[in-house]
Amino acid sequence: MKKEKKLDSCKENIFETENEEVDAYIVESNHSGKRLDLYLSEKYNDVSRSYVQKLIKDDRVLVNSKKEKPSYKLSIGDELLVMIPEEKELELLPQKINLNIIYEDEGLLIVNKEQGMVVHPAPGNPDKTLVNALLYHCGESLSTLNGKIRPGIVHRIDKNTSGLLVVAKNNFVHEHLAKQFAIHSITREYEMLTVGNVDWDKMTVNKPLGRNPKNRLKRAVVIDGKRAVTHFKVIEDLNGFTYMKASLETGRTHQIRVHSSYIKHPIVGDDLYGYKIKKFSNLQGQMLHARKLGFIHPLTEKYVEFTSELPEDFLKTLNKMRSL
């Protein structure tokens, strides 16, 4: 996130009745011509585009100190001020939403989350989340260790990433699973489609990750970040693209996406850490799928492992790449 003194100095005058923090951005050349609402949706990728549009219509977004429509086309050097309202306590409601549950017992369940589904409620996504669906399916049989907004949630995957998640039905199971995540003994394998071809079969990226100093919603390789290790392995070379597997040794926010971008092979469809590709401009998210998940079951104390099928959109993109 870029902030300049002239932007900071005018905040009090523009939003003088508000106490919330104001984010400031300056549009760079690679975003010239992009719609205002789309640009902000990419900056705040954990909220919906309709929420961003509402912010603009509610005069919580200014472009060069003026109000603009969501369809406004950005120019290089445009100065944006964005004020996100203070979070209100969210009300959790059970909702009848189809879940792809591939395993369930008295202590946990394994969900194959579809791309586009948010894991838990947040500003801009107050409902229709995985948690809302779990409340309908499980009732009160969910762990409470992660607070009332995240019942049962032991770990998360991004909204636009598909794949496997383990959900805890009670605190005993949750605590034991959390310990395995903490010591990085969980098997977590992803499959992905990346930009460009590589001259290696395997590669390990051991680079610390932290919050991006220029954009609070992004992560980046930073010297004082937390240890992050990703193991990449090529599955198939394609024409200008690579189908590969990524195994997590650690589990930092956006880890695979950031490390893929760091080695100059961003994930196809990842506009936050990569870029749009004309041939695949219709994708709704990154081609990243949590394919395999394994751990010691807290109740049986035996190792269990689960795999999921690749989603239809991923397969269509892969087959299109094969035909290039």
Image (cartoon, helix red, strand yellow):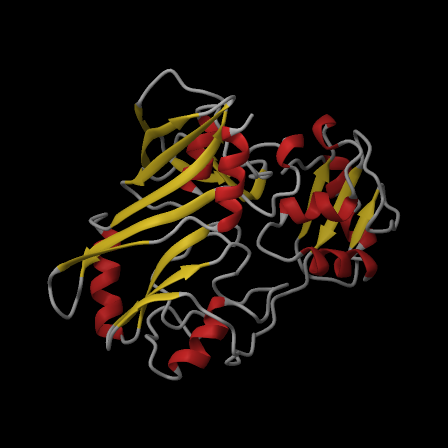
Q: Position of residue 175 (x, y in %)?
A: 23, 66
User: Is 259 drawn above or below residue 303 in the view shown?
Assistant: above
Residue shown at 72%/59% (left/top)? 50
Residue at the farthest left position: 301
**From the image, which quarter does the N terminus lie in?**
top right
Q: Position of residue 212 (x, y in %)?
A: 52, 37
Q: Position of residue 132 (x, y in %)?
A: 50, 74
Residue shown at 53%/39% (left/top)? 317
Residue 305's image quarter?
bottom left
Q: Is residue 222 visible?
A: no
287 sits to left or right of 51 = left
Q: Is residue 138 visible?
A: yes
User: Is 275 drawn above or below residue 187 in the view shown?
Assistant: above
Residue at the farthest bottom position: 140
Query: 270 or 72, which is in the foreground?
Result: 270
**From the image, which quarter does the C terminus lie in?**
top right
